[in-house]
């Protein structure tokens, strides 16, 4: 049996204000993150204050849960978990 496919959708408000704290969490759990995609609106020279980060995770679900908990501890972060079982 193969591992589950683990995806995190992370909604970030005031992303520039929280960027350093979020980056520290992502660095700490870098061994769990296989793919990282950042989405935010850009209009001319201004970037949206909000954004979405999509994370494809590897490893066991304990590490995945620890990453979720660490991100949710950051102010302005909302997470949706997606687990595909194989």
Image (cartoon, helix red, strand yellow):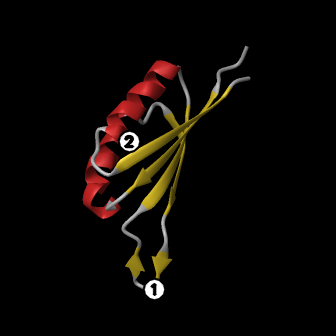
The reply to whether dot 1 and dot 2 touch (C-beta < 8 Å) is no
Is residue 67 rendered to the left or right of residue 3? left
**Image quadrant where residue 28 sits:** top left
Q: Distance between the residues labelled 1 and 2?
A: 28 Å
**Count of numbered labels shown in the rendering:** 2
Tag of residue 44: 1
Q: Position of residue 85 (x, y in %)?
A: 69, 24
Which of discs 1 and 2 lies nearer the camera? The answer is 1
**Image quadrant where residue 15 sits:** bottom left
**Image quadrant where residue 59 sits:** top right
Q: Which residue is drawn at 47% across and 82% down?
A: 43
| Near-viewer residue (59 or 62) | 62
- Determine whether 82 is above or below 41 in the image: above
Q: Position of residue 58 (x, y in %)?
A: 56, 29
Mark 1, Cα crowd under 10 Å, few <14 / some 14-19 / many 20+, is few
Extreme top residue here?
1
If you read the primary sequence from the N terminus, does the residue marked by circle 1 or circle 2 appear first?
A: 2
Is residue 62 rendered to the left or right of residue 14? right
Mark 2, Cα crowd under 10 Å, few <14 / some 14-19 / many 20+, is some
- Determine whether 17 is above or below 62 in the image: below
Q: Considering the numbered disc 1 on the image, is that residue within a helix, a strand or a loop? A: loop
Q: Quadrant of the N terminus?
A: top right
Q: Where is residue 27 in the image (x, y as percent from the top left)?
A: 35, 40
Residue marked by disc 2:
26
Q: Position of residue 63 (x, y in %)?
A: 44, 23
Q: Which residue is drawn at 41% across and 71% down?
A: 48
């Amino acid at each position: 049996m193969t591992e589950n496919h683990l995806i995190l959708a992370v909604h970030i408000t005031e992303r520039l204000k929280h960027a350093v704290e979020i980056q520290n969490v992502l660095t700490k759990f870098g061994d769990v993150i296989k793919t990282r995609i950042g989405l935010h609106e850009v209009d001319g020279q201004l970037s949206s204050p909000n954004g979405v980060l999509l994370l494809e995770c590897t490893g066991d679900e304990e590490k995945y849960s620890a990453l979720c908990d660490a991100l949710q501890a950051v102010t302005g972060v909302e997470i949706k978990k997606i687990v595909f079982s194989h």
